[in-house]
Amino acid sequence: MPDAAARGVRGTSEGKSSGEIIRMEEIRKTYDTGKVRVEALKGIDLVVNKGEFVAVVGPSGSGKSTLMNLIGCLDTPTDGLYLLAGERVAGLSRDQLADVRNRRVGFVFQSFNLLPQITSLENVEMPLLFGGVPPKKRKERAVEMLSKVGLADRMDHKPTELSGGQMQRVAIARAMAMNPDIVLADEPTGNLDSTSGGDIMSVFTDLWNQGSTLIVITHDASLARRASRVVEIQDGRILKDGAGAAA
């Protein structure tokens, strides 16, 4: 496995130094319906350090989505060790997993998953609200994040008043709001045209250059080329793991 330097780890002005953020050892995930038993992941070993930009690629049915769900604490492995920022997450209850997700993982989805009836600012405030952040600090943080993704002039707009690219920028700002250990993006350019997709790729690159740890599940070869490291999955196993074009 490439060392941190080879994988293009970035430093950060906020004090996040390079170091292990994700450790998976012999991770297996089996779905058993009673009639059919499907082994979606077959012994995944994966280490991600702070400051990496990792693209996870592979064909449909390869296990990418299952791996994303495990990394994001949306599901737990059938077997194996998973440490997120040193915290063992396998075996946690649903409520405990929800707490870990809110504190440690920022999600960006293909379909944006914004609440249409509230403003961009209020959407970005949502994880801060659930995290118990006081109203004044919530607003300050949301304003900071929206400004960071170039939407300082769209804070009072509702999602229905924004373009697809702008909605995804709001989603990225929301993902960053709690200053998570990792930002996990699932096909973030999948619903965008090439121009908007390019803009979103630039946002991710900027976040990485500022020290964020990014894991992107993607079919988009252009986005994968922006990453410092590319992990290719096939048939539930890691086929390749090496430096990307940006390393």
Image: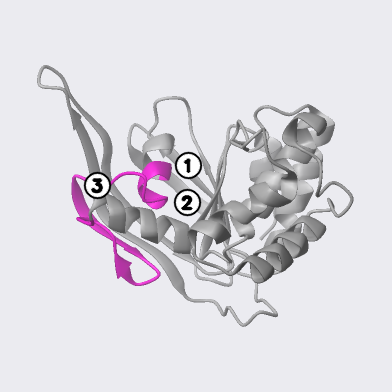
Please provide the residue range marked out in magenta: 68-92
The answer to whether 72 is drawn above or below residue 236 in the figure is below
Q: At 44% across and 68% down in the image, what residue appears?
A: 21
Residue 53 versus residue 149: which sits nearer the camera?
A: 149
Question: In whole angstroms, how far apart are the C-alphas of marks 1 and 3?
Answer: 19 Å
Q: Residue at x 27, y 47 (%)?
A: 76
Q: Quadrant of the N terminus?
A: bottom left
Instruction: Pinpoint residue 31: horizontal percent, then vertical percent.
Output: 21, 30
Amino acid type shown at disc 3: Pro
What label sits on residue 77 in the rendered view? Answer: 3
Residue 192 quadrant: top right
Q: Earlier in the sequence, mark 1 or mark 3?
A: 3
The outermost residue toward the right is: 153
Q: Residue type at mark 2?
A: Asp
**What residue is shown with label 1?**
232
Disc 1 marks a residue whose amino acid type is: Glu
